[in-house]
Amino acid sequence: MFGYSYRSTTALLLGLGLLAGCGESNTYVPPPPPSVTVAPPVQRTITRYLESTGNTAAVNTANLVARVSGFVQSIGYKDGEQVKKGAVLFTIEPESYELKLKQSEAAQDSARATVVQTEGDFQRQSELAARGSASKAALDNATASRDNAQANLKQAEINTRLAAINFGYTRVEAPFDGSVTARKVSVGDYVGGSGSPTVLATIVQIAPIYVNFSINEQEVLRIRAEVRRRGLTPADLDKVPVEVGLQTESGYPHKGTLNYRSPTVDASTGTLAVRAILDNPDAVLLPGYFVRVRMPLGEQAGALLVPTVALGADQSGRYVLVVNKDNVVEQRTVEIGQREGALQVIEKGLAADDRVIVSGLLRAVPGQKVDPQTAPAAPAAK
């Protein structure tokens, strides 16, 4: 009897325990809202830039050609060498052209002597004709001889000048400072004998250097309105700074100024062609490079900026996630502007007092509550 009561009591207690345990497991306790970090947008004055892409181009490029015929006597540079204006790069058989020059000079001296002689005869015949001692025919002959001698002297002077020019062409000189390409002829080659000039090499000037880029029509209208508002002149526009960066460089380390603006907008592309000029003293930029370009347009006060990591993108465009007053996540479509280091300018869609989610974005779902932890304003742009 005693054993039966003990077992029954134990079973009853176990059953009550199980029932109690089952009751606790059916009670749902919701998880706490996920924690995210929020920060207000940075609000400050920024410099507005027009950003574009462009290509570098040589300021001067010229083919060095043989303007006289003959054999190449010497080559005065190494392929790819930097040369100064006036440096002798090729010499083309100068001796024969020097002899032709001396020949023309001798003919000129002879023609000058003839002019002196015929001028004397003319003066004598004029004096005799005035006294009635010489016939009119004799005076006419002296006059014709003098005029013919003067014409021959002019022709001799022209021949001498042409001979001097051709003699000068035997020395092919650099027309400007630049780098000379590999030579296309060798010493001993006969050049200049065909109908078209023989190209000996090409010289390229890369310091300074041009950067060509384009501005879209909307930016052109905005810039022209700003120019009118500020009363700027064409001379002022030529002083506008332009900054350039290569694809492998951070920022825009190369500085220059605006150099040219096309007078018309290209109707097929809706863009205006512009050009900058940079000193390029170390020849870092070479013609043909693809570069990033930016040009300051003025300052804007009170611009709003957020960290670039806070931006997302979907089919509707760029957006940020913000936490409203009820701690509920909202997706806010925004229009972005230029980048400022680690920050992105927000043109539209954001207010200065919005709480932007800057960390914990994967835990933030639009329409759901979160536990916002306020962080300091986003870091300043570098």
Image (spheres, helix red, strand yellow):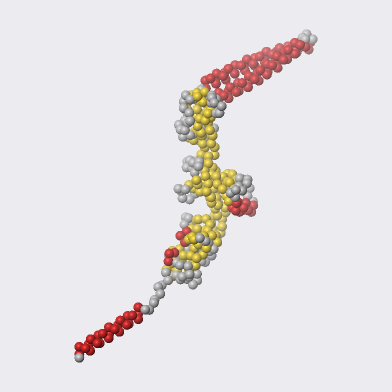
- Position of 30 compared to 144: left or right? left
Measured from the top left, where is residue 186 in percent x and y?
Answer: 46, 27
Residue 30 lies, in percent from the top left, at 40, 74
Return the residue found at the far right: 132
Position of residue 267 in the picture relative to residue 89 (left or right): right
Q: Quadrant of residue 7?
A: bottom left
Q: Nearer the viewer, residue 90 or 243?
A: 90
Q: Is residue 238 above or below residue 359?
A: above
Q: Identify the residue at the far bottom of this view.
A: 1
Query: Could you tell me if residue 29 is visible in this image?
Result: yes
> Is residue 376 among the parts visible in the rendering?
no
Q: Is residue 167 above or below residue 266?
A: above
What's the residue at 45%, 67% (across, down)?
Answer: 365
- Write the residue at 47% across / 59% down: 308
Residue 209 located left or right of residue 138: left
| Picture quarter with the N terminus | bottom left
Q: Where's residue 114, x and y in %?
A: 66, 14
Out of 303 and 180, give the one closest to the viewer.
Answer: 180
Query: Percent position (x, y) of residue 179?
Result: 49, 35
For image coordinates 62% across by 51% down, the residue present is: 224
Give the camera-side residue of 254 and 307: 307
